[in-house]
Image (spheres, rainbow, N blue to C red):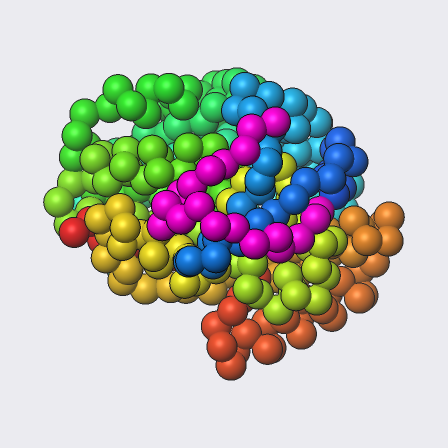
Amino acid sequence: MEEIQNCPVCNSQIFDACLSCRDHFLSGEIFNIVQCHECGFRFVNPRPAENKLGFYYQSPDYISHSNSRKGLFNNVYQGVRKYTISRKYKMIMSFSPGNRILDVGCATGEFLSYMKTKGWDTLGIEPDGSARKQAIEVNGLNVLDEPYLEQLPDASFDVITLWHVLEHVADLSGRMKSLNRLLAPGGILVIAVPNSDSHDAKFYNDFWAGYDVPRHLSHFSPSSMNRLLVTFGFKPVKTLPMRLDAYYVSLLSEKYQFGKIRWLPGLWNGFQANSKAKKDDNYSSLIFVSKKV
């Protein structure tokens, strides 16, 4: 285990105990989440060493890597993903200054494949070998392993997307510097993450699937994300809700808490979370759109 001494967002060294969460998905281990006393950013601390993190993804049930359609839950996930991809495209088109896109953590490549059919110049980064192979062989994409990210030329992309990826990144400050370097002047950065200030997070507490320790190392709120963006040279442009995530996360949280997916309570709690978020915009997941300064 390694212990983080400085907050990746504001560099403070004072942390408050926040929550202890069990890895309900795989290992059953318990991990501590701390909150920075200065900026409120939450993160797993201590955490597994970076070279040990791969162990916590080694399951055929990890949907984004396996692209599994086994069971009702996975089929629902696949259907929702297909719907949301078209909405992501329309959103990006409303902000985009060009058509060169990098998707970091592209998994099996469904989003990039869609963008390619729309005439975009696409490149993906994916550390998982089996997911990367499927993206290349099944979807015909150009996808590189994660170390290649640092070898790409400066200002190579008009848009960079990270769909539920940044919370997994071990070197948060290093990654933000790379994203700034790779974006062309005026380029758009799109980051989607779970919102630890959401109503479903407060309802499920340590059973909230959005924590997903230790795969999720960082736990963002709107304030900590916007501070992170400004710190690394981005100007926040817009924050958008991912309303369907509340249902998915609530159903998975039900499974973690009760040992099985309770469909009616899960769907109801997802609905309730979205209803409350209409008043304060604290949806289960948020998309942060920013521009390179």
- Along the viewing direction, whichever of 105 and 198 lies nearer the viewer: 198
Q: Main secondary structure of the magenta part?
A: loop
The percent coordinates of residue 107 (x first, y second) are 50, 32
Residue at 76% over, 46% down: 72
The percent coordinates of residue 192 (x first, y second) are 44, 51
User: In the image, is 91 to the left or to the right of 243?
Assistant: left
- Which quadrant would residue 156 be assigned to in this image? top left
Q: Is residue 89 visible?
A: no
Residue at 48% over, 57% down: 37
Magenta range:
1-21
Residue 6 lies, with reference to residue 255, above or below; the image says above
Residue at 23% over, 57% down: 235
The percent coordinates of residue 179 (x first, y second) are 28, 38
Q: In the current view of this chain or complex, which residue is farthest to the right?
A: 259
- Along the viewing direction, whichever of 37 and 249 lies nearer the viewer: 37
Residue 70 lies, with reference to residue 243, above or below; the image says above
Q: Quadrant of the N terminus?
A: top right
Q: In the current view of this chain or complex, which residue is farthest to the front?
A: 14
- Which quadrant would residue 113 be assigned to in this image? top left
Q: Is 224 inside the magenta-drawn segment?
A: no
- Along the viewing direction, whichever of 216 and 238 lies nearer the viewer: 216
The percent coordinates of residue 208 (x first, y second) are 69, 55
Q: Is residue 35 visible?
A: yes
Residue at 56% over, 24% down: 49
Q: Is 13 inside the magenta-drawn segment?
A: yes
